[in-house]
Image (spheres, rainbow, N blue to C red):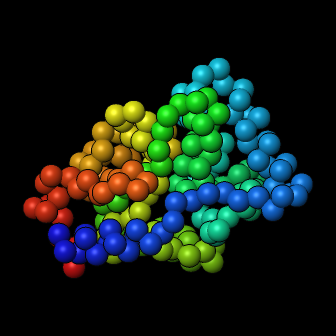
Amino acid sequence: MTGLVAELKRFDLIGLSRVASHGTGCCTAVRHGVFARLRQYTDVGGALAAVPELIRWGPVQWPAHWCDLPDQDELSGDCGVHADVAAVVLAQEAVPHSRGRAVLQPAPLAPAHWRASWHEAQVVDAWIGGDVVYHEVLRVGDSWWDPSEARWFTGAGAHLGSGRVLAVREEDGPWHIAPDTSATHVLP
């Protein structure tokens, strides 16, 4: 558990992601295009589910601006971009929510693969720990929303496609650690 606590403290140093704007046409056009496409959905659930479809998951350098997201003919962004866009969708619909963080234990080879991808893109990989990763999520009511997988989850102890949720917390709240984590997950 000591290793997990150290990773939680390290991940706490990562600020929640907010996609910025240069205040010029380069950012305005991309932002407008993203939200125009998401407004085509008739309900907030459809718009939330469309976020990772519209913005494929991949490396982005932080701080990021809207004009940084286009990658050839598509948009690319990480869980922070997905969480920020999803939070705006919820705010536009006046759905109470809060930003959150999760620590995931992915498949054993995933961290090395992601680290290589981020290095190839020459992007900082501070979100990748030894065998756990930092992930941005949203709290909506009593549930958690993973904006990168477009799915609900129950919190610490849940399983997502990208890994087991070892810990989760709302923006300024305490970490909630999965009850069986100390017995099953000891980091070096």
How many labels, in total? Answer: 0
In this picture, is 177 found above or below 38? below
Q: Position of residue 10 (x, y in %)?
A: 38, 74
- Quadrant position of residue 44: top right
Which quadrant is home to the N terminus?
bottom left
Residue closest to the far right: 25
Which quadrant is home to the C terminus?
bottom left
The one nearer the camera, 172 or 181, is 172
| In-image side of 102 versus 158 (left or right) | right
The one nearer the camera, 152 or 118, is 152
Residue closest to the far front: 172
Residue closest to the far left: 183
In this picture, is 68 found above or below 50? below
Residue shown at 66% from the left, 25% from the top: 41
Residue shown at 79% from the left, 42% from the top: 33
Q: Position of residue 71 (x, y in %)?
A: 74, 58
Residue 145 visible to the viewer = no
Residue shown at 39% from the left, 40% from the top: 144
In this picture, is 115 found above or below 106? below
Q: Position of residue 24 (x, y in %)?
A: 88, 58
Residue 30 visible to the viewer = yes
Residue closest to the far top: 42
Q: Position of residue 98 (x, y in %)?
A: 47, 44
